[in-house]
Image (tube, rainbow, N blue to C red):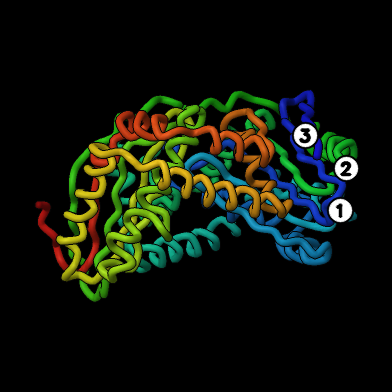
Amino acid sequence: MQFRRQVLDNGLEIVAECNDRAHSMGLAFFVRTGSRDESPAVAGVSHFLEHMVFKGTPTRSADDVNRELDEIGSQSNAYTSEEQTVYYATVLPEYQAQAVDLLSDILRPSLRTDDFETEKQVIIEEIFKYDDQPPFGAYEKCMAAYFGQHPLGNNVLGTVESVGALTPDAMRSYFQHRYSPGNIVLAASGKVDFDALVSSADQRCGMWEPFSAPRDLSFSEGQTGYLSIAKEHVSQQYVVQISPGPAADDPDRYAYRLLTMILGDDSGSRLFWLLVDPGLAEYAVVSCYEFQGTGITMTYLSCMPEQGADNLALLAQAQAELIQDGIAFDELELAKSKICSHVVRRGERPSNRLFSVGNNWLQRGEYHTVRDRVERYRNITVDDILRVAERFRVDQTMTVTVGPNEIQRN
């Protein structure tokens, strides 16, 4: 296993975890752009642009793009989040050059007006679809309420109004302000020919003009509060809570991930035994989301409507006990065993390592082996957990409930 890095003259970074024993490889362009980089006037443009990238280039039609991806047997897709847009493919090593050629080509799309108007309707339908699916916009509403005017509160999909008003010229302008080579990382993992990867990237991307693409990295204090939304024809009660958490570059993130696993892993955690195992809730989990400059803790709960109020009270009790009483040594060791096993098992597939390598480099400019990550978790102590529990209070929440009942806060 070898980590290698190269920077092209225009600022495009190329990083790879090369494993000669692997039988496949993954590669992706990680673009440092997402909903946090949007103004209200272009809300949803990052995600819309992700769709448009596959609609063709000056040298390929949309059919050509999809056909050629199939011809090299790739598993490929793209996604947009608050902080990044990622275009990826996993292939056999002999198709490395073709995959680089394809992905780099679509990152300079035609952005034709006819395609734009057609895809706009697809995006609007997608917004309606997600609003109709559980938990019925609770995540987006909670993010907006917690972050307030901070750009991390922006909805990744945008709104029907913002997408409906978006113009081709506004999208082209956004592309020209965000898709700078210095704002992009080409990451690869598995059986990678790194020298050939750099050569291909230089040939295909070396002429991209560099420009500044700054980002607001201000810290968000976060808001606390409570919002209950009654929605007809919903069979369950859904709860989303957000509380503070470590930022992407915070060294406490390892201890905090263990804390959230102890409190709300989907099996064997405190919330599992308190709510899920006795049948009081169908789902009760806690996760941390680390952004650049700030971070959050996200709690999800779903249950029968008549159990919503009681479960919210039990959730608050579990959060208070964690802060007041701390954790037991055995709980920590169990959490370490689970998370280290997960890290090792995921690390066996180049496609999984691709996202670990790419995300780490885009967010932090760091590379960690599987062994590095396991060691960091193994070194966490009970005192570390107590410290981060006090630093990031899981009881300081913004809560949104959606369901047939409008639940009054106790």
| Residue nearer the viewer, 318 or 202 | 318
| Residue nearer the viewer, 221 or 45 | 221
Mark with earlier residue (3, 2): 3
| Residue nearer the viewer, 74 or 279 | 279
Kindly state the secondary structure of the residue where label 1 is placed: helix
Mark with earlier residue (1, 3): 3
Q: CA distance from mark 3 to mark 2?
A: 12 Å
Q: To which residue does mark 2 refer? A: 193
Res 93 label: 1
Q: In front of the other: label 3 or label 2?
A: 3
The answer to whether any part of residue 38 appears in the image is no
Q: In front of the other: label 1 or label 3?
A: 3
Label 3 Cα crowd, 10 Å radius (few <14 / some 14-19 / many 20+): some
Amino acid residing under circle 2: Asp
Direction from residue 328 to residue 193 in the image, left or right: right
Amino acid residing under circle 1: Pro
- Residue at 75% x, 43% y is 188
Label pair 1/2, CB-CB below 8 angstroms = yes
Q: CA distance from mark 1 to mark 3?
A: 17 Å
Res 3 label: 3
- Residue at 42% x, 60% y is 267
- Residue at 63% x, 50% y is 111
Task: Pinpoint residue 93: horizontal percent, then vertical percent.
Answer: 86, 53
